[in-house]
Image: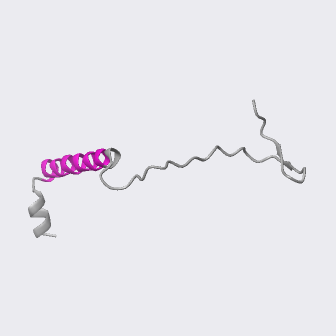
Amino acid sequence: MKSGYTLNNEGILNNYAIEPQVYLEEAVQAGFTPYAELLNGRLAMIGFVSLLAMEVVTGHGLIWWLTNV
């Protein structure tokens, strides 16, 4: 098990936290990835349910809110 103390190149004590190992994925994560599609779908569901809740609470729909603001 590693301790929280290390020595730098000059032999000086370094008592800062040990940083986690950094890694990079080679695959490009842009465009229509499964993660992006899941996130987009979940946000759309939250928006739709929020609009339904607003209509139930206020008695007015989205079109009324957009035309009377």
Per the picture, the main secondary structure of the magenta-coloured stretch is helix
Residue 31 location (% of width, % of height):
32, 55
- 17 vs 21, nearest the viewer: 21
Colour treatment of the image: one colour
Is 31 placed left or right of 11 in the picture? left
**Residue 26 covered by magenta stretch:** no
Residue 62 location (% of width, % of height):
12, 59
Q: Quadrant of residue 66?
A: bottom left
- 61 vs 11, nearest the viewer: 11
Is 62 placed left or right of 24 in the picture? left
- 29 vs 39, nearest the viewer: 29
Is 56 placed left or right of 13 in the picture? left
**Residue 52 covered by magenta stretch:** yes
- 66 vs 5, nearest the viewer: 5
**Image quadrant containing the N terminus:** top right
What residue sits 54% from the left and 49% below the top?
24
Figure disc tally: 0
**Image quadrant containing the C terminus:** bottom left
Which range of residues does the magenta coloring cover?
Answer: 37-58
Q: Quadrant of residue 2?
A: top right
Task: Residue at the far top: name it.
Answer: 1
Residue 25 location (% of width, % of height):
50, 48
Residue 44 location (% of width, % of height):
23, 50
What residue sits 10% from the left and 56% below the top?
61
What residue sits 35% from the left and 45% below the top?
35
What residue sits 13% from the left and 51% below the top?
55
Task: Residue at the far right: name it.
Answer: 11
